[in-house]
Image: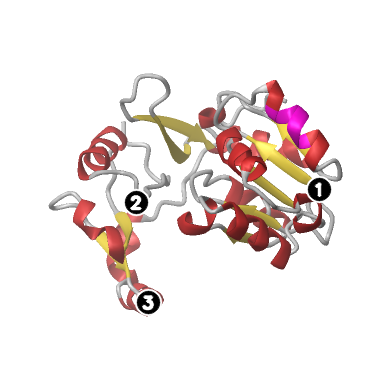
Amino acid sequence: ARARAHTHTHTHTHTHKHTHAQVVSTDVVFMLADVRYTVNIPEGLPHMVLTPDWTDLLRAEAATLAPLVKYDRKPSDCAMMAMTSGSSGKPKAVIVSHQATTMAFAARYEVFPYDENDIEASHIFFVWECLRGPLRGLPVHVISEEILTDPPQLVRFMRERKTTRVVLTAQLTQSVLDYPNLDLATELQHMKFWMLCGEVCPSALAKQWGKRVPNVNLINYYGSWEALDITY
């Protein structure tokens, strides 16, 4: 059965083949696409290209989108689609329900409570991390692909925006630790929680982090994140 109202993410690393596999496996009915990646839109799929004036275009075309909007949601209905390849290398869609999303958010609110000064940074790969802060009335700064893979730019991004928490992979975190001449204790002076997700965290990374950035809590909640579990 179609999972009706949901979202899943697509990045520039996805080829046309991967995008087509996502569309087929998740029964996508409409796609929002960055103007740079329109070549990957499957033929015949209704879509909207996010040009600089996309908000004006959306208002003008709102009437045509009405049939896609459903409000009769149940807790078990799909809230989002998380795409994962795991160890197989083949894209798979994981259906995440509204109930699972809400429970996971509630658990993290309790374990890592926000205060009014918290500011999150997130890469769109972890799409749910862009949702949790705003549900508490707090801002989230989205990290671009170019900044994400450049350690000096990444930590500068955190410092300039006074970021207090972020979720990244262990591999990206290791690249930050390994980059020469970065004063991480200063650059991350506002950071409270640096959270690891998406892959295994080596013990050596945790030890290195403790020596280099003792003022920031390193949190490993790696688990079956595609299902928004609440492992800790």
- What residue is drawn where x is 81% and y is 48%? 192
- What residue is drawn where x is 56% and y is 45%? 128
Looking at this rendering, what residue extends furthest in the front direction?
Answer: 181
Q: Quadrant of residue 90?
A: top left
- Along the horizontal axis of the image, is 158 left or right of 34? right
The answer to if 206 sits in the magenta stretch is: yes
C-alpha separation, residue under disc 2 versus residue under disc 3: 18 Å
Q: Earlier in the sequence, mark 1 or mark 3?
A: 3
The residue that label 1 is drawn on is 192
The amino acid on which the numbered mark 1 sits, given as a three-letter code, is Lys
Q: Quadrant of the N terminus?
A: top left
Q: Quadrant of residue 174?
A: top right
The amino acid on which the numbered mark 2 sits, given as a three-letter code, is His
Name the mark nearer the viewer: 1 or 3.
1
Contact between labelled residues 3 and 2, with CB atoms less than 8 Å apart: no
Give, as a single range, the part of the protein colored magenta: 205-209
Q: Secondary structure at mark 3?
A: loop
Q: Quadrant of residue 154?
A: bottom right
Is 26 placed above or below 121 here? above
Q: Position of residue 161 (x, y in %)?
A: 70, 66
Contact between labelled residues 3 and 1, with CB atoms less than 8 Å apart: no
The residue that label 2 is drawn on is 12
Q: Position of residue 12 (x, y in %)?
A: 34, 51
The answer to if 155 sits in the magenta stretch is: no
Q: Position of residue 211 (x, y in %)?
A: 82, 36
The residue that label 3 is drawn on is 52
- For the residue carrying disc 1, how many other residues have a C-alpha within 10 Å: few (<14), some (14-19), or many (20+)? some
